[in-house]
Amino acid sequence: VAFHPMNEIPPEDEREAMERELVIVGLVGMIDPPREEVKVAVAECRTAGIRPIMITGDHPLTAMAIAKELDITRNEQVYTGVQLSKTSPEELREIVKDVSVYARVSPEHKLNIVQALQENGHVSAMTGDGVNDAPALRRADIGVAMGITGTDVSKEAADMVLLDDNFATIVAAVKEGRTIYDNIRKFIKYTLSSNTGELFVMVVAPFLGMPLPLLPTQILWINLVTDGVPGLALAVEEAEKGTMAREPQNPKAGVFADGLGVSILWTGFLMGILSLGVGFWGFMQGYDTAVWRTMVFTTLTLAQMSNALSTRSFRDSLFDLGLFSNRIMTWAIIITFALQIALIYVPFANTFFSTAPLNALQLGICLAVSVLMLVILETVKWFRFRK
């Protein structure tokens, strides 16, 4: 900022002289700073195994200054559009391994960078708001368009529209996605391990000389009510501790990866052994068939409740999570338990489901074995993931 001292305003044709012999007053700098939450979001990305890359049309010095402020880069490397235009695809594949800041680039360069990252085996997400960003948004595994400043073309090309144009929202979406994926795997584990337990009981019982341990109506009850209600409660489980502190899931890995298939089998076998063991004990005691069958039915149902509680987290103890932190799960178990008790002691239910009232000892054994199931599951989890 400067001024030219004068006593009067000169004529129109002499005003160019006003721009000479100026007296400087000071300098004015302008900056469009990143949002405060972006730096935290970038740090969370790094912790989550996500590498943030800046691709901008700004001057290289401006791009590098912002990148360092946000900790996007930890070196001095910045590539410009001019340099990228002279780079072969093979060279670009090597460049993108280390360079995280690109300045003065064109939409074509964005597309080339995305392709190079994908050819190196990375899953890429690209943000954009202009018409020219559409090819890169389409090419990226996840195209993210800006909802406020984005054009209609970019929104149509994208897989996701960011309504608030905030980078931190993308990170929040990643966390939500990981949580949903975890909960899907929990639901699968709970349902299939419960079904494995039922199958074990039905297959092994005849080899022990026992009649059918479960009747069709009882199996239907287990599959519709006992499996369904707590299973749905797992879908609303909160994110686990460390959700954003682990590497991204391998897109080529199946849903049964990381030992989930083995966990389903041994959990199901444990449930089946305990439930059938209770029934076999009642069978050897000479109890009426309806009584020991009801004991199998009840033990299997309550053991599934223990399985549901333990499945709330793959790593953390139930007591670390909080026994009642998932209120929907708490109510699901209370309701399921109440309905199971009704099936045992309500005469109409006895007739329809072929159950029989249990005395205190028989019901106590069913409860104790189901608690034992929970203790075993939590103990195995502790030994597996202790540090």
Image (cartoon, rainbow, N blue to C red):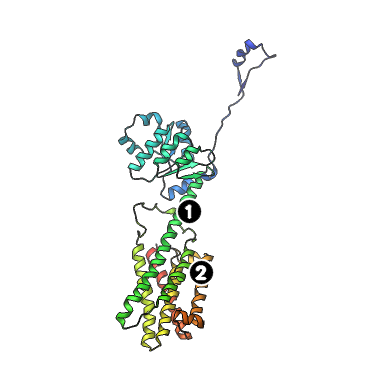
Q: Quadrant of residue 85?
A: top left
Q: Which residue is mark 1?
A: 176
Name the secondary structure under disc 1: helix
**Residue depicted at 52% across the width and 43% down the height:** 166
| Front: mark 2 or 1 | 2
Q: x, y (%) of residue 345?
A: 50, 82
Say the numbered circle drawn on residue 74: none
Q: x, y (%) of residue 316?
A: 44, 63
Q: Quadrant of residue 77?
A: top left
Labels 2 & 1 near each other (Cβ < 8 A): no
**Residue depicted at 35% across the width and 43% down the height:** 118
Relative to 334, does residue 170 appear above or below in the rendering?
Answer: above
Relative to 330, does residue 42 appear above or below in the rendering?
Answer: above
Residue 220 seen in render: yes
From this viewpoint, which residue is outermost toward the bottom?
286
Relative to 271, does residue 134 appear above or below in the rendering?
Answer: above
Q: Amino acid at mark 1?
A: Glu
Other-residue count near label 2 (Cα within 10 Å), few / some / many at <14 / 14–19 / ≥20: many
Residue 372 seen in render: no
Q: Quadrant of residue 53?
A: top left
Q: Amino acid at mark 2?
A: Ala
User: In which quadrant will I find the C terminus?
Assistant: bottom left
Name the secondary structure under disc 2: helix
Q: x, y (%) of residue 39?
A: 50, 44
**Residue depicted at 35% across the width and 56% down the height:** 254
Q: x, y (%) of residue 134?
A: 44, 37
User: In which quadrant will I find the N terminus?
Assistant: top right
Q: Is residue 88 left or right of residue 324?
A: left
Q: Is residue 254 left or right of residue 242?
A: left
Q: Which residue is mark 2?
A: 332
Other-residue count near label 1 (Cα within 10 Å), few / some / many at <14 / 14–19 / ≥20: some
User: Mark 1 or mark 2, which is nearer the start of the sequence?
Assistant: 1
